[in-house]
Amino acid sequence: MGSVFVTRALRRVGRRGASLAFVGLLSLVIAASLAFAPTTQRAAPSYAILARVAPLTVWALAWLMLGLLCLVQTFMRSDRIAFAAATALLILYGLIYLASSITGDNPRGWVSGAVWLAFGGWIAVIATWPEAIVLDRLPKKGTAAVIVADASGTIQSWNPQAANLFGWSTDEAVGRPLTFLMPDRFRAEHNAGLRRVRESGRSELSGRLMPLVGLRRDGSEFAIALTVNAWHSDEGVTYTGVIRTIGGRRVGAE
């Protein structure tokens, strides 16, 4: 049960969210190390250099605020502020230590500076990962249901319209296969199509408008129009499906 919860949580936040959570927890640790550093440790060059720029309590507060921001935005649609703040603080640290090496206050400060700058660069790279594009493409308003799924057809995220349309909450849907949103008679064909895309690396359905049948939580069927877009990432093909009902008709009732 615990492993299932962890898997669903990771799929929901994605690689960006998991990385942001790591940065958030690390920031809290750094904040504690600055706030509760013993007197002997405060005399070390790495701490003394920071204290010349600003009191250690100020640095501790900055890391604390960054940590909380990262942890909060881990589960939000928009995480750009957290990534920008993390990158800025890490680069600032790197520049301070590089400057201390140049001035001679800390001859080996260039080592710490290089590490902090590399860390900041890594965070900046994460901010450009494809998942940012996926989230930005999700409509925030309107009647279209939007579902994002990975190469295996597992739901990664969907918008509130999709939850209202199919009757499943986001927590219930994320991590489940797309097949649970369609009648049994279409599932084998759907899985075969996903397998062909994985093997060939091409999707013939991308961009096409397709009339299909959806399945609500209560078991009722309804006519839908689906538009699928697919793109490639390091983890394979990712799909975004835009779904609209066709006249609100119930298929099974006709």
Image (tube, rainbow, N blue to C red):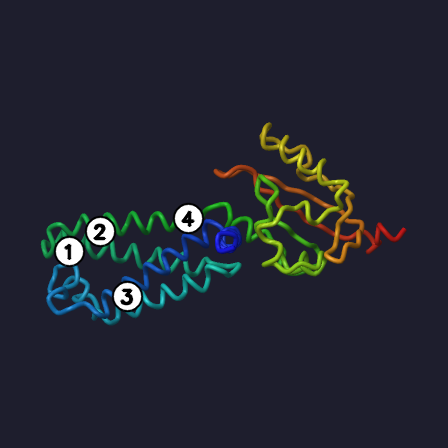
Q: Is residue 58 left or right of residue 85?
A: left
> How far apart are the alpha carbons under marks 1 and 2?
9 Å
**Are the residues at dot 1 and dot 4 in contact (C-beta closer than 8 Å)?**
no
Residue 5 in percent (x, y) is at: 51, 55
Q: Which residue is mark 1?
A: 100
Residue 89 in percent (x, y) is at: 31, 59
Which sits earlier in the primary sequence, circle 4 or circle 2? Answer: 2
Q: Which residue is mark 2?
A: 113
Q: Amino acid at mark 2?
A: Gly
| Front: mark 4 or 3 | 3
Q: Quadrant of residue 20?
A: bottom left
Foreground pick, 134 / 187: 187
Q: Which residue is mark 4?
A: 126
**Are the residues at dot 4 and dot 3 in contact (C-beta closer than 8 Å)?**
no
Q: Is residue 42 above or below residue 242?
A: below
Q: Amino acid at mark 1?
A: Ser
Residue 195 in percent (x, y) is at: 62, 33
> Which label belongs to residue 31?
3
| Front: mark 1 or 4 | 4
